[in-house]
Image: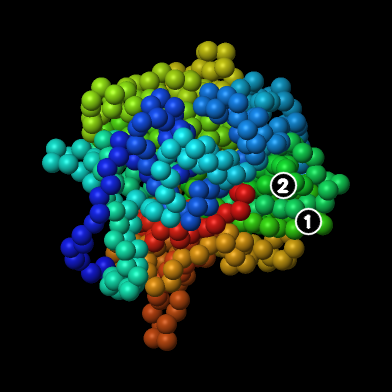
Amino acid sequence: MSAEPIAETIERESMPCDVVIVGGGVAGLAAAIRLKQINDELEVVVLEKGSEIGAHILSGAVVDPKSLDELIPEWRDMDCPMAETPVTDNLHWVLSKNKSYNMPHIAMPPFMSNNGCYTGSLGSLTRWLGDQAEALGVMVFPGFPAAEVMFDDAGAVSGVITQDMGIAEDGSHKPDFQPGMEIEAKYTLFAEGVRGNLTKEMKAKFNLEADCQPQVYGLGIKELWDIDPDKHVPGRVIHTQGWPLSESDSWGGGFLYHQANGQVALGFVTALDYQNPYVSPFQEFQRWKTHPAIKEYLEGGKRVAYGARAINEGGWQSVPKLAFPGGALIGCAAGFVNVPRIKGSHTAMKSGMLAAEAAAAAVAAGHEKTELADYDANLRESWIAKELKLVQNAQPAVAKFGGDIGTVVAGIDMWMRQLRIGLPISMKHEPDYTHTGRADLFRPIDYPKPDGVISFDRLTSVAFSYTNHAEDQPVHLKVKDWDLQKQSELGVYGGPSTRYCPAGVYEWLEQEDGEMKFQINSQNCVHCKTCDIKDPNQNINWTTPEGGGGPNYPNM
């Protein structure tokens, strides 16, 4: 059990600006660039918790360039790394235990096509966008997480306070202590990504989810491999469904993208609404790699990187109210992932651009800390809304009916919506944690041991995420009720935290007296947020650690 920080008054420096953006991903940087394109005199600040721009970015990725074309039309001629590998080949496999069946293209609605898209490192694209933002005069501060939201006397968001540095685990100040800075802003855009802790606070304070469905999630786990050049087909995109999740009554799917430099990005997404508390998304991924169709590409190759992150899967019906006094949600903080297309970067960027346009207009009109109602309204009339409405029943259909039948139902609904005769319903969600079943109702799953060549253990994998946290700092994974964790998470649900975490953060250790201790290895945390989502009692709260901590993904 970690000590609570020692309360004391801290004198802080203050920095005023027009707009502060919390998060240096593609949504936040697209917003920053658009703000400066509209008015280069605007003072724009981007705060990023990673050690550098792109350090915490993880995605497949196959990118629809729609928003990039709008934001920077000449990007293909500006040494943008995403331009290197256009998609050339699309395959969708349905896997049984030992075989694969290619789904014909005619079964897919036209909007599911990857023609005209690009595959590559989203982290590299983000770094490139960071360079474009700085060239326009945006102040970009990596290694400075926003730790607290400030409010004015009327209750409007008035900026953020960055994380204090140099605090010991007991809350005392170390010799290198540096207090966080107050960033005062006319408008604050929250671009924290999936399940950001400040975004959660804004949703609760302003009741932003009153008129939408709960957000639901998947856990995406990814590796980057150098493969045999004879097996590499630049631009080939493969998606899979079926085995091995069909054996554990859960659902999701895999991807394998042939990218630049003889590399493939491969990964696996497990929907977090699974019932069996013995499911391990990490081990499902490792098992998936042993399928003959996947293993064929990996044999003779070498893994070079590993990572994990949660993914919004709620779709259009889970998009909350986006604007509130002084602030707005953009990108994955709001949740614009198109689940069937397995894409969210283009919608995230467009949301940032729309928020930037609303904020720039408000500042130009002499306003500050008002509600950017135009942003919310304009987004709901944009192509983001049109695109997400086409697929709004796909995720809940598979969640309700299972992988095989659900895919058929989802496909019929998407085709009908493509033909503008869609079903007149919007299927609903329930929070992922509510699906978790009691351990006594399920059998443990006997996962195969890793071979160290194709499949690996978790701790070895974490080393390939290049994760680093200062050891002497407060634990950033906050357990609200330690007794509840023992009695329920362990006693009722069998300790699923030891399995859902892809980084081995959580352990239940038996002490000499026979009592069980909940061990939190926070230095392993890759910031995926799964614990915050899947804990059956919502008893773990993910918060930001000291600036610069976490993974340092190379070209992920």
Residue 96 visible, this angle: no
> Alpha-carbon distance for marks 1 and 2?
10 Å
Image quadrant of residue 462?
bottom right
Q: Amino acid at mark 2?
A: Val
Does residue 458 sit above or below 48 in this rendering? Answer: below
Q: Residue furthest left?
A: 153
Q: Write the residue at 47% across / 28% down.
A: 350
Image quadrant of residue 465?
bottom right
Q: Which residue is mark 1?
A: 301
Q: Which residue is mark 2?
A: 264
Name the foreground residue: 385 vs 277: 385
Q: Residues within 10 Å of mark 1 (few under 14, many from 20)?
A: some
With 159 as the anchor, is 379 left or right in this view? right
Secondary structure category for the residue under label 2 = strand
Q: Where's residue 366, x and y in %?
A: 23, 25
Q: Write the residue at 33% across / 74% down.
A: 175
Name the foreground residue: 75 vs 502: 75
* Image label count: 2
Residue 206 visible, this angle: yes
Does residue 66 sit above or below 484 in this rendering? Answer: above
Q: Residues within 10 Å of mark 2 (few under 14, many from 20)?
A: many
**Which quadrant of the figure contains the N terminus?**
bottom left
Secondary structure category for the residue under label 1 = loop
Q: Amino acid at mark 1?
A: Gly
Q: Residue furthest top?
A: 420
Q: Where's residue 461, x and y in %?
A: 61, 62
With 112 as the anchor, is 488 left or right in this view? left
